[in-house]
Image: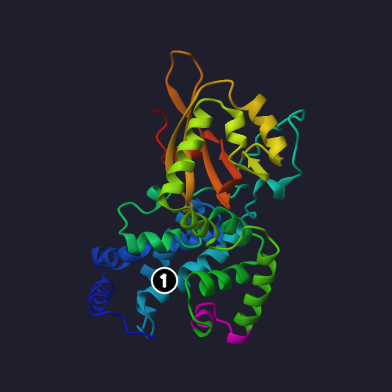
Amino acid sequence: MNEPAQSDAALLAAARAGDPAAFDRLMAPYRSELTAHCYRMLGSPFDAEDAVQESLLSAWRGLGSFEGRSSVRTWLYRIATNACIRLGSQRSRRLVSPDFGPSRTVADDLGRPITGPVWVEPWPQEAAVPGADPAEAYLHREGVELAFVAALQHLPATQRAVLILREVLEFSAAETAELLDTSVAAVNSALQRARQTMAARPGAAPARQRAELAELGSDGIRALVDDFVRAWESADVDALVGLLTADVRFTMPPLPAWFDGRDAVAAFFAVGVFATPWRLRPVAVNGQLGFACYQQQDPQGPFRLGALNLLSLRAGRISQVSAFVDPDLLVRLGIPEAL
């Protein structure tokens, strides 16, 4: 294993001597990627922040036991992974709408909002990694796609940790075994079982959406964004439907209702979405295309935040619109409340 870098060693020595500023500088390069790791583990940016705070407190208290036989980064991932496993054992598994119940039709009641720590939550990149350089930003896009994070929540905690450490963060089997206080054989077995579970969940590959965006290219992405914004803002249901796959899904937590298939989604758009004008602003969410959606309730009134729409793509078309409509969640995510 790598020895700590000299700069880390100097900061570590100062931190061990009781210098909190040195500790903060030692932790600063790792905090954002630890938050991304905890988000993958827990499915919520707020739970992830709790886990990071707990991890940093544990690291401060445990400085005396860190002997430098691994890198500071590896040591922190060990602490953070175990913090996530502990927190996850105390909280319910996060869900997406199809996990909660069957799809509906426009004739159905949309249901009462299901509030509380129930849903897998989105992760706006700007809020999570302010000022990140391109190399660091890549770490946060990798493995934070919504479908992947949601699928991870179906794995037992240890399998989830193994899959993330091995296939997203690319720790070796031996390093992963040491991080989790287990054997290489146990790591390999857990990874095999995790892969089998994930393979059964469509769209759950960790880089699926990145590949879709790469295939579109910058011109294709720009055209799709322009077409989607134009159709939504002009309430052109036919144009919107033309952008969708046949098996598209539309979800809107915390409402339990969701719609499955282009016809059902088109019918809901026609009767349930465009009673008021909208204005959309692109945002980066979970390494995917996203839009902050602002709604005008009064003809002369302001446009206020009504939803965060996250698009999943397949072969250049939209295969899912994940609309997050909880106003408290949107405010906590730091999205501007009005245009």
Q: How is the image coloured?
A: rainbow
Q: Place residue 323 in its image quadrant.
A: top right
Question: Residue 32 at what x, y percent from top left?
Answer: 38, 60
User: How far across and how far down the image is residue 83, in percent?
Assistant: 51, 65
Q: Is residue 288 above or below residue 339?
A: below
The location of residue 243, given as percent across then percent down, is 58, 40
Between 333 and 69, the one lying in front of the other is: 333
Quadrant containing the N terminus is bottom left
Residue lying at the far top in this picture: please name it. Answer: 300
Q: Does the magenta segment cover residue 110?
A: no
> For this view, does 156 lie left or right of residue 57?
right
Which residue is depicted at the point 42% across and 76% down? 74
Task: Identify the residue at horizontal 56%, vertical 49% (top origin).
Answer: 312
Q: Is residue 180 magenta?
A: yes
Residue 118 lies left or right of residue 167; in this view the side is: right
The amino acid marked with disc number 1 is Leu
Q: Does residue 19 lie above or below 222 as drawn?
A: below
- How many other residues sit within 10 Å of disc 1, few (<14), some (14-19) or many (≥20)? many
Which SS class for mark 1? helix
Q: Quadrant of the C terminus?
A: top left
**Circle 1 is placed at which residue position?**
76
Residue 287: percent from left, percent from top = 46, 54
Evaluate whether residue 127 shows in this view. yes
From what the image shows, is residue 95 above or below residue 230? below
Q: Which residues are magenta?
A: 175-185
Label tally? 1
**52 sits to left or right of 197:** left
Which quadrant of the view contains residue 188? Answer: bottom right
Between 92 and 94, the residue placed more toward the observer is 94
**Taking 189 as reference, is 298 left or right?**
left
